[in-house]
Image (cartoon, rainbow, N blue to C red):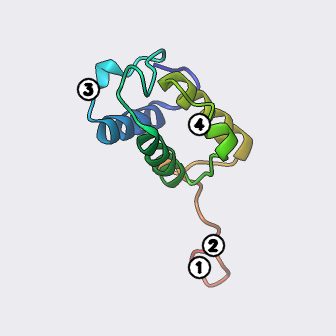
Amino acid sequence: MNNILSDQDTQAVLDILVEQLGVQEPQLTPDARLQEDLGADSLDIVEIIMTVDERFDISVPDEVAERVSTVGDLFDTLAQLLEKRGGPQSSEGRRPRPQSSSGAPGL
């Protein structure tokens, strides 16, 4: 569907959309409009963005989230934010937390 995100990250986004919107994966084309085509309301979009934030350990700024109107926009936005953040990704799509000198995860 996209050539920017890894297959695992792409599938994670598709899973979020299927769960949040109650749609079938084949409906999630890049041109599919979240509200008009997939039936999302403003609360659905907020929940999608919050879930993406949590899943990928990022923060989508409100002014950026407001410009997300299609599935493709969501993929592009996520790819840009992940690229801007940089750094290695763990297999769960999150950057590993730094370890303290004691070996415990840092905060």
Q: Is residue 12 visible?
A: yes
Please identify, in this view, whether the residue under mark 4 or under mark 2 is nearer the observer. 4
- Measured in 3D between alpha carbons, the distance from the residue under mark 1 to the one under mark 3, in whole angstroms, is 43 Å
Q: CA distance from mark 1 to mark 2?
A: 5 Å
Q: Which residue matches tag 3?
A: 24
SS for dot 2? loop
Q: Earlier in the sequence, mark 1 or mark 3?
A: 3
Residue 82, percent from left and from top: 64, 41
| Nearer mark to the viewer, of 1 and 3 | 3
Residue appearing at x 54%, y 50% in the figure: 53
Q: Is residue 91 visible?
A: no
| Quadrant of image for the C terminus | bottom right
**Does residue 15 sit above or below 97 in this rendering?**
above
Label 4's element? helix
Amino acid type assigned to the residue bearing label 2 in the image? Gln
* Residue 71 locus on image (x, y percent): 48, 25
Query: Label 2 near label 1: C-beta < 8 Å?
Result: yes
Find residue 17 and report its horizontal and vertical position in percent. Answer: 37, 36
Ranked by sequence position, the earlier of labels 2 and 3 is 3
CA–CA distance in space, label 4 to label 1: 31 Å
Compute the Cα span from label 2 to label 3.
40 Å
Identify which amino acid the numbered label 4 is placed on.
Leu
Residue topped by disc 2: 99
Q: Reply above or below: 22 against 93.
A: above
Quick one: label 1, few (<14), some, or many (20+) residues within 10 Å?
Answer: few
Type of amino acid under label 3: Gln
Compared across the picture, whether 63 is left or right of 33 comes to right
Q: Which residue position holds label 4?
A: 78
Instruction: Specify the label residue 103 is tagged with.
Output: 1
Point 36% across, 25% down: residue: 38
State the residue at coordinates (39%, 33%). 40
Q: CA distance from mark 4 to mark 2?
A: 26 Å
